[in-house]
Image (cartoon, rainbow, N blue to C red):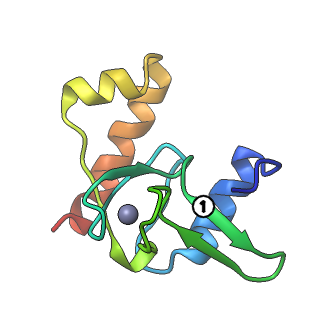
Amino acid sequence: MREELSLEERLRILRETDTERRWYTVDDKRLCLICERIISGRGIRIDGGPDKYSLGCPTPGCTGEFSHWLLYRPTPAELESLAPDTAGVMDILAGLNRRGLDQL
Ligand SMILES: [Zn+2]
């Protein structure tokens, strides 16, 4: 993992590299089909660069990358635990509404 990346850089790289699904925040969640775990944009391994990056599942030993990740919709209780501040919750809810059509 590239610890030196700011959250803004991380989000930009996620957006540019993941051509399958939209990233709204680095706290967006994905379900990895390889390891069947919920992962977050903050934990995703970013390698390569500066022109081309690769994304990797944060689970040790998992070979999943963005084509294996499905959008994950948190339950309302999980939403609260994810974003204790009201503004964060509203951002996530707005993101979920925008992402509705992407759900399986
Ligand atoms: Zn995985």
In the rendered image, the residue lying farthest to the top is 85
Residue 37 placement, left or right of 52: left
Question: What residue appears at the point 74 percent right and 82 percent down from the top-left corner?
Answer: 52
Q: Which residue type does callout 1 highlight? A: Arg
The quadrant the C terminus occupies is bottom left
Q: Residue at x 40, y 51 (%)?
A: 39
**What kind of element bears circle 1?**
strand
Query: What residue sits right under mark 1 in the picture?
Result: 45
Depth check, front residue: 65 or 59: 59
* Mark 1 within 8 Å of ligand 1, using the beta carbon: no
Left/right of residue 17 with respect to residue 104 in the rendered view: right
Left/right placement of residue 82 relative to residue 26 reads left
Q: Quadrant of residue 17?
A: bottom right
Q: Out of 103 and 44, give the one closest to the viewer.
A: 44
Residue found at x 38% / y 48% = 95
Residue 86 is situated, as x and y percent measured from the top left of the image, at 43, 18
x and y percentages locating residue 48 in the rendered image: 75, 76
Q: Position of residue 42 (x, y in %)?
A: 56, 46
Identify the image quadrant of the N terminus. Answer: bottom right
Quarter of the image where ligand 1 sits: bottom left
| Location of residue 4 with respect to 36 vertically, above or below | above
| Viewer-closest of 5 and 57 | 57
Quarter of the image for residue 94 reads: top left
